[in-house]
Image (cartoon, helix red, strand yellow):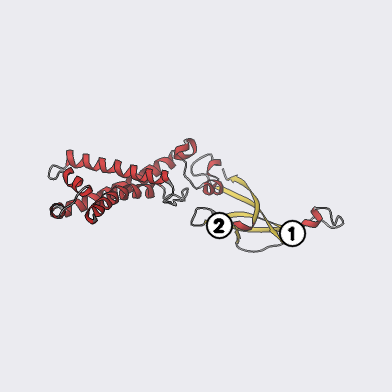
Amino acid sequence: MTNITFGVALIIILIILPGGIFRRAYLSSEFSNYHLRASNFSEIVFTIGMGVLMQCIGILFVKYLVSRYTIDFNIIGQLLTSPSQTTFKAIGDYITPIFFYNISLCIFGFILGRALMYFVLTRRLDEKVLMFKFDNEWNYIFTGKLFARKKNDEIFKYVNVCVAIDDSFVVYTGFLRDYWLNSTGQLEIIELTKVKRKVIDRKNVEGVEQNNPPHTEYKFEVDKLLIPYSQIKNFSITYYDLE
C-alpha cells in the first residue's frame, strides 16, 4: 500500500508541478492576485489540465525528436498500480534523463506562462475578452488601465477618501501613490501623497447646529498618508491622462 501511495503521489506531483509553474508565471503580473486556494475547484482543474497538456507535449517531443530515449508507459502503469523493486530499479537506471525531462518541462511551463501573459497584456486582450481578464480588480481600478487611450499613457489618479472619526467625517484628497492587498487578495491599505484634509461635522450636516459651517478645511502637510481600507466609508477616483 505504501508503494502504491508513493507512486500515485509521484505521478500527481509530476502532473501538477508543470501546470502550477505555468499558472504562477502567467499570473505573475501586477494585475493578478494569485492566491491559489485548495477549495477552489476551478483553479485545481486548470492547474492539473495544464500539467497534463504539457506532459503530452513533452511525450510527443521525446517520441518524435529525441531518438535516444523513449517513455515506457508500462513503468508509469506499474507506479500507479503495484510498484515493485524492479519498477524503482528501472526508474533509477534512467534517473538522470527523467530528472532533466521534468526540469525542462517546468522551465517550458514557466516560459509558456510568461509568454502568454505578455501577449495578453501587449494586445490588451484582458480588456477585450473576459476569459483573459486578470483577477486583481483593484489594480484595474487604481492604475486606470481601462481609461488609458494607449498602452504607455501615464495616468494620474486623484482620490477623495471619506473616513468616519467619532461624530465627524474626514475627507482626505490627494494623488494615489500605492496600495497593498492582504493574503486573501482584499484591499488593505492605500497610500496618498499631496494630501489635503477636510473635516465635516456630522451634527451640522444633520441640521443640529445650523449656525456653524458644515465643514472645516485644515492644512495637512505630509509626504504620504496611509489609510486602512477598513476605516474607509467610501472613496472616489478621478483619472487624468497626461496626453
Kind of residue indicated by mark 2: Glu
Residue that appears at 26% across and 43% down: 55
Report which quarter residue 193 is drawn in. Answer: bottom right
- Label 1 amino acid? Ser
Q: Position of residue 85 (x, y in %)?
A: 14, 55
Whether tag 1 and tag 2 are in contact, CB under 8 A, the answer is no
The tag on residue 210 is none
Residue 14 vs residue 132: left or right?
left
Rendered residue at 79%/53% (across/down): 205
Q: Secondary structure at mark 2?
A: strand
Question: Which residue is under mark 1?
Answer: 168
Number of marks: 2
Residue 137, visible in the rendered structure: yes
Q: Is residue 133 left or right of residue 86?
A: right
Q: Quadrant of the N terminus?
A: bottom left
x and y, in percent, of residue 96 in the image:
17, 54
Please tell me how crowded label 2 is: few (under 14), some (14-19), or many (20+) other residues with Cα within 10 Å.
some
The label number, if any, that marks residue 188 in the structure image: 2
| Dot placed on the residue nearer the N-terminal end, 1 or 2 | 1
Closest to the observer, 111 or 48: 48
Q: Nearer the viewer, residue 138 or 42?
A: 42
Instruction: Kindly give the residue lying farthest to the top in the view shown.
Output: 128
Give the left or right position of residue 115, taking residue 242 as reference: left
In front: 194, or 161?
A: 161
Residue 46 in the image: state x and y as whole percent: 38, 43
